Structure formats: structure tokens, C-alpha cells
Image: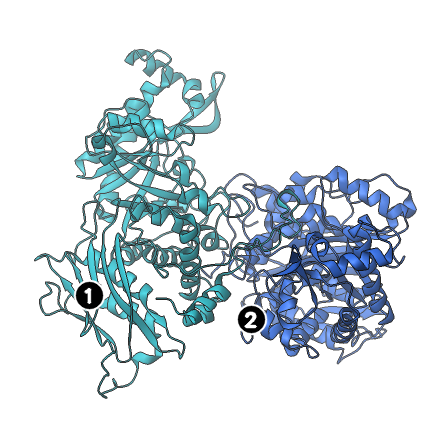
Amino acid sequence: SSRVSSSGSSSALSSLHTVEGVWPLPQSFTSSTERYPLNPKAFYFGYGRQSAAQQDCSVLDAAFKRYFSLIFPDYTSGSGDKPFTVEIRVDHADCDSYPNENSSERYNLSVSAGQASLNAETVWGALRGLETFSQLVYQDDFGTYFVNKTEIDDFPRFQFRGILLDTSRHYLPVQAILKTLDAMAYSKFNVFHWHIVDDPSFPYQSRTFPDLSSTGAFHPMTHIYTQSDVRRVISHARLWGIRVLPEFDSPGHTQSWGKGQSDLLTPCYRGSTPSGTFGPVNPVLPSTYQFMARLFKEVSSVFPDSYIHLGGDEVDFSCWKSNPDVRAFMQKMGFGGDFTKLEAFYMEKIVNITSALKKTSIVWQDVFDYHERIPKDTVLHIWKGTPASYKEELSRMTKAGMRVLLAAPWYINHIAYGQDWRNYYTVQPLNFSGTEEQKKLVIGGEVCMWGEYVDATNLTPRLWPRASAAAERLWSDEKQTSSVDEAFPRLQDFRCKLVRRGIRAEPLHVGHCKHEYQGV
Amino acid sequence: MITALKFTLLLLALAFAQGLHYNYIDELDKEAGTVRAVQASQYVSLWPLPQKVKILDLSFKLTSFNIVDAKESSAGSSCSLLQDAYRRYYEYMFGIAKRQGPRKSRLTGPSELTELQVWITSPDSECDGYPSVTSDESYELSVDLPYAVLKAPKVWGALHGLETFSQLVYEDQYGAKSINSTAISDFPRFAHRGILLDSSRHFLPLKVILANLETMAMNKFNVFHWHIVDDQSFPYLSRTFPQLSQQGAYHPYTHVYTPADVKMVIEFGRLRGIRVVPEFDTPGHTQSWGKGQKDLLTPCYSGSKPSGSFGPVNPILNTTYDFMSQFFKEISTVFPDAYVHLGGDEVDFTCWKSNPDIQKFMDQQGYGQDYKKLESFYIQKLLDIVTTTHKGYMIWQEVFDNGVKLKPDTVVHVWIGGGANEEMGKVTAAGYTTILSAPWYLDYISYAQDWQKYYKVEPLDFDGTEEQKKLVIGGEACLWGEYVDATNLTPRLWPRASAVAERLWSAKDVTDINDAFNRLSVHRCRMVAHCYDILCICISFYDKL
């Protein structure tokens, strides 16, 4: 076997030519040391005769093209003339649809002499299976490709496995987003949560309200996402089986919105006169809701996913408090001095707008904390607290019958010296007090890469392979992946795979990859 | 001096490098308007800040501009170091495309600056030499009509002056390259301004090293401390002992530095005024050496039998010193710098203690159980060996702490955090020159703006006489490689190391953190635009500054 490491762990790593080398670890598998050489010139993807999807299935045809290059990263002609075919069979020809919250990602992969059979309910499951197959193929010291005899039955533990990118604190060029989508698929993430706008900038170019980006973006031409940019992201994501979940966070985190939409934000007062600064969205004006209805109508047609993230976090009440019109409205509504009621009032109206558009809303946990009576189909997103406090929150939310998404343990923008991936790996998302029914309400988790200190120069090495640690937690069986020390050599091996694929994934610790990153 | 438009663009480009802490529970800041917008510094975007700067509100266009040798210059067209630098900075300022095609022959207007004349004033320009710790790096830059003049005693100052000149160039609102009337007189506060890269914990491909030398030049760093080998791997391909890398590198072909690679690094550095100081750390940190050199390391014992593992270099065998003589003889010819770094840190005595031959030797020497004496014995012999190669040496602070007799020109490298000030006091009181790294271990990362911590360090902030302070010749930012390779080295090092660069170059009283933030933000975009990294995201903004 190849000489993988000089630091004494080579025996551990050389065993990764088996299914143990697949990241995230499949749910059930048997593997063998029996191996078959692969020759790129005699390697084929094909559709099984019983497959509902056949030639011209856009998703799979594109995947074959991509995975051919991923499986054979250099053009050494393999040994052996025996052809090898990966035969795909899917139950549903959902080739032109988008992945959604109910899409099955289950697949079954059987590798034997001369062929691999990949069966899945949907094309999305087939994509996951292709990824697994691509990770099973390896090269020996002479460059010959091999795959071992393997049986895999696999499915995700959680249906929602997301990554949040923040394109407001720093603009991320479309290329950087697309490359992140590629790497997400390598770790079987399936939701790109696009925190597209926030206080610092509004890069989304709205058809209905073009002034939002022309005055609210860092630059009106170079630092925006045009409609075609957005389409490109969505279509690229679709081909990898990734949903694009847009977030238009309000009523707080909206400073940049105010630049292009007058009267949207609350004028703050100093004493009896406006101070010239603005606070959260103004919840007392009917024009606010007219604007939001039109904006979300656009957003819901631009983004095909059935979920929209409405934010609702960290609303600063001081500006509302200072404003006499807001105070008069509070009195009229009987809210007293409780501004959380005003926030709840606002969020309820926004959720109703998106409900009317047939979208499911996701909101940050603050909305629930303020106001537990929110529509039952809303998904709550936990972002704060220590393990003890977010577990408590998980209990409370699921007890109220709400579906929950967990992000608190995976704020990956917070960096520290050493192997902090271990913290992300050892999270136990369902280790909170609650019934089995409650646990089923946890739909998944999300890795958040907030953008205060992140742009295209450092996004990739900061994200990978640290996010991959969370990926295994969200996909794989928790019992089989409970040892962080066993995960270590596997994740090292996987990070070298990422590097080989051109992803600038940083090292976990001392060592080397056979093929180092070749850029600067 | 800064027009409103320029100001706005600065603001656009640079705001939010420090932002609100979104969703960050520990640092929730509920006050609205806490985003610190970047303000225009009166020093525009110069980094590190020159010693004396005067910029007037009078701008010139650079329409048909060229960089030429002044007639009086002692370095003419035969000085390829300068000719290379002219081309590099020309392309950097104006792009490669514009160099093609004939020069415009039209008359230039009164506010057009057509030339930068580079005038090396000393009879010996040092054009073909190597920079050293005593090199004169000073320069004077005058940007005025009819032409700008860059005066420097040696080429090393001229290189820094060209960098400064390029930092003064901006595009006006119509996109024309412009520069303001400026007078600068500049020199470094400290002579030794280094970056340590570690190519043993992870192999660093050659182009990563070269790209960082380029970025070092943009920050007026002048020493590349190449921690080339260590326990984990031995990528240096030795002509005398090729088996060291054959056996000790991560891979004998893909993960080594050949003699040609090393030469390229040295020359690339020289052309940018950067010294290359190699470190061959012994007697500890040498596990990888043992793979290719039998009997070099101490066999560790478990009870009365060798355990199969090895410890530090074996200090009691003559063969050890024969090897070191030959090895350092090679090193002294391969690396032209007057100094070699000999390491000497973190020696673990447990293996020596376990070995019966060593114990016997200790008895013979009358060392008792004081293994520091054995370490000193080894180091003493090594220093004598290196002295015969006519090199000076740098060593980590432990060697000094253990009382090894050192040559008066030895540079003691202070790296242990906590008590670094005391150590600086001790080392200089003993009359040795010293460099500081303890506060600048850049491999230690943390959330948010840690560059400020590096910036606020004052290297002379220890108890000592003026004479003692003069012995502090500089410092180094260290980027150890446990968690760093080609994938993340550049964004981890820059612009954090730039904070160290200014501390080591600029005057002691340059400490305004807000002004530094403003200039460093622009400087970061400049580095990004210089494409040391794959994505040039700031380029559009930089062009408009």
C-alpha cells in the first residue's frame, strides 16, 4: 500500500481504500479486500433498463460528466481492458425538479467485478451514491485505479443538512459560492442557506426594487447578485441536489435596506426630534407590509425552494422606544411597554405574507422566545447558547410541537488554535430531554459561516474540512461514529481528497497529502 | 487632500472589515451604529508608515510614465536587480498590457509626471550582492515636477522606495493613474524584520514560498527565516547526504526542495532585498534526520534494552560531529547569508537519561545528572564547527539560558511567551544581540482582530539601558506549520503579519490603532489585488482609490 504518512499512522490510513474512507460514513456497509482495476478508457455510466430516468436526465447526465473527472483526476491509462460500468436505477424520473424537504436521498450501491449497481428512489439519492462511489475509487503507487468489492445501503440521519454563507458582511463572488456548493456535495450537505442581505450591504438585485442594491450594495455594479447570478447559483445547486434557502432577515439587521427604500426603517428620535439614524423596519406603517408583500412575492418566485428564512433575530428595541409614532401604536394595540409584543406582531404579519405565497417560514429562535404562538408549520432555528441552554431550547420548542433546526454548536466562523473540528464532531443533536415524537421534530442542523472576518480570500480553508465534521454528524449513524479518534484518520484522508479536487481544505494536523494544493 | 469621492470609495471598500457581531452571544452589541467605518488616513494608504512623510494636495497624472536610472546613479542598466524591480513595479502599477506597443509621443501637460529617476548615491550600489543585517535600507523619495527622484545609498533602499512609490499611486475619478506631490524620507527602525515559515510539519510548495516573499516585500520584511526541517520531515535535498531527504521527506521526489529550488528561493529573495536564513535545528527536533543518517540520533532504552525509538542527536559520538562538519560545510556554501539558525530549543532529556552510554559519558565528564551540561557540550562543539565555516549564528533562547559560551555576534532568538521582556533584559545585559518572536506566534489564531495585539507590541518595552536596547535588532513573525499548509498559509499570514511589519519598520510613536486600521484595510486590498491569492476581490475598489 502507498506510503501515506511518516508520523506513524500509515497503517491506519492505508486501510482507507475500503468503505471506511467514505465521508460521511454510510449507514450500513460490508467491504472486502477484493479489488478491481478500473481503466478510464473502459469506464461507463449507464441507466438500468428498469430505471425511471433514462438518457437525457439532466441531473444525472451532468453528474456523470462531473464524477468521471472526480473519479479519474489524471489521465493515466488504467491497467486491464475489462470494462466497468456503473449502472443507475432510480424509481422516479424527477430529473427536472428541485430537491425539496421530502426528497429521498437513500441509495443502495453494490460494487462487484465489472460493475456497480446504484439504486435509488430519486435522482438525488443517486447523486449521493455517485459521491460515495467516487470516494471508493483510489490509485496505487503506480497510478492504477482500483475499487474494492463493496455493499452499501445508505440514507441520511437528518433531512436538513445546511451551510450558511453570509454575503452581506463581505461580498462573495459567484465563483466562490459555486465552488462551495461543489464542496458541499462532497460532504453530502443538501441545503445552502443564503444569508444574502444584512446591515452592511444588500447585494441582491431585486427586479421589483432595484434601488435596494443600487444604493445598498457595497458597489452597485460589481458587488451585487443579478437575477442571472441567482439563477446560476440555484441551477448549480440543483445539479448537486442542494436546495437554496434564501434569508431576508427583518425587522432587525436591515440597515442596508433603508438606503434604497425610504420610510422602510424606523426613524430614531433623540428627545422630540429625529436623530437622523434609523432602527429596525418600521412595524407601524401599512406601507411596510405592502413593500414586504411585494418583495417576498418576488423572492418566492425567484427561489424555487418551498422554505424561506425570515430571520427575526436580534431586534434592538431602543430605536422603536424612542419613536413617538411607535409608542402611540403600542398604546393603541395595548402592548404596554412590551416591545417583544411589537416584534411578534410584525413577525406574524410577515409569516402570514409568506404563508399566502405557499412558503414555509424558518425563523431564528428569538421569534419563538418572544412569542410561542406562531404558526405550527414554522421551523425554528436555534443559534445561541451553551450546550445546556440549546438543549433546553430544543426541549421547549419540540414540546410545543414545533420543528427545529440546530445551528448553535456549529458557528464555524469562530476560530481557535488546534483541532476544533473535534467539537463540531462530538455534538449530539438529539441528546435533550423529550419523547421520541419530540426528537423527530429536529429536522437537522446547519453550519454557519458568518462573514465579519470572512471573504473569498479565506472562506474555503476556514470552512473545510471543519464543516465536514458536522456533515458526518448530520448524515451518519451516531453510534457508529461516536469515536472522534477513529474519525481523525478518515477525515485526514477525506481532506486530502478535497485538496485533490481543488478545494483549499486546510490540514487537521501535521502531515501531508500525496497531492498537495497547487495554488498559492 | 483626500477628495470627497475618494473618501466615499474608501468607505465603500473598507467598511465592515470590522462589523457587528452578528449572532455572537458573548459580544452582543446592541447599540446601533457601532460599525466602524474606515476613514481616510492623512497618510493615504502607506504601509508600513515611512519615518517622514509630507503629501501635498497637488496631483500629477502618470500618463506616459517610466522608471529610469538617474544619470548620476552608481547602478546603471547593468544592474539587473533594479531593472527587474522597475519592470515588476511598472507592471504592478500600470498592468502588463500597457507595456506593449509604442510609447505615446504626444506632448505632456504641465501636471504630468513622466519619470521616476532612481539614483543610487553610494559608489558601491551592492547590486550584485546579498542583503545583510547591516545593509543600508534607507531612501528618500521626492515626487515633484519635472520628475520624481528616488535616492538611496544602496539598491536595498531603492527597492523599498519603489514599493512606497507604488503605494502612492491611485486612480482619479476618471480612472487616470495619479500621484500627489510627496516628500518622503525613510529608513527602518529595526534591521532584522523576519517571517518564519515551517516547511517540515507540512511541505510548502515552492510557489507558496515565492508568493510569500513577494508579499513580504510589499511589507518591507527583509528576512525569510526558513525553518526547513524538523521532526516531521526533512525536505531539504542535501548534496552531501541525499539520503536525509530520500528517507526523511514526506515523499522523496514530490515533497523535497532540490538545490535548484533553494537557489531560486534565495535569488527571488535577493531581488526583493530579502535575506534567506535557513534553520537546521539540533539536537532536538531531529526525528526525521535519523531516518537517513544511521547512528545520528540517540537510541532510547527501556530498561537495559534499546526500545527501538530514538531521541535527540547523539552528543557523545565523534561520528556525530564529523557528520555535522560536513553537513554545515554544505549549508554554508548553499546559503549565502552570513547567518545560519542553529535552533537548540526544546531538548527532551528523557531519552538521553535512558541510554547507558550517555550516562557513562556524563560520569566521565563529571556532569552528574545535569543534562543541560550535556546539551551545552553538544552545542559548544556545534558552534565551533559552524564558526569554521565563517558563518555567524542565531540560536533559540534556551541555548543562552543554559549558559553556552557564545560568540559576541550571536543573535539570541527570544520565543517563549510570558517573561519575554525579562529575557530580553537578560540577553542584552549579557551583551548579545537579540530578536523578538514571543508575541508574534501567528499560528495561534483566535476569533476577531488579533492583528491589534501584534500591533501594540513594543519590542523595547523591557528594563534596560539605552545600550541594551540597541542590541535588539528586530523581530520575527512565526507561522509554525502544525495546522498550516498551502491551502491556508496565505490568508492566515496576511494581513496579520503586516501588523508586525509596521511595528518593526516605523517609528516608535506610530501607535494610533485607528489610523493603522484605516491604512491596513487599504493595504490588505492592495495585497489581494496583487494576486498573491487566487481571488482578486478587492481589485475593483483598489483601482478606484
Q: Which hue is chain A drawn in?
A: blue
The quadrant of the rendering that contains the C terminus of chain B is bottom left
Rendered image coloring scheme:
by chain
Q: Chain of mark 2?
A: A
Q: Is residue A155 visible?
A: no
Task: Identify which residue, B2 or A136, lies in the foreground.
Answer: B2
Give the quarter of the image for residue A479.
top right
Dot 1, how many residues are within 10 Å of its Cα: few (below 14), some (14-19), or many (20+)?
A: some
Image spot of residue B439 (x, y percent): 41, 38
Image spot of residue B493 (x, y percent): 44, 51
Q: Which hue is chain B drawn in?
A: cyan
Amino acid type indicated by mark 2? His
Q: Is residue A367 above or below residue B176?
A: above
Dot 2, how many residues are within 10 Å of its Cα: few (below 14), some (14-19), or many (20+)?
A: many
Q: Is residue A477 visible?
A: yes
Image spot of residue B542 (x, y percent): 42, 68
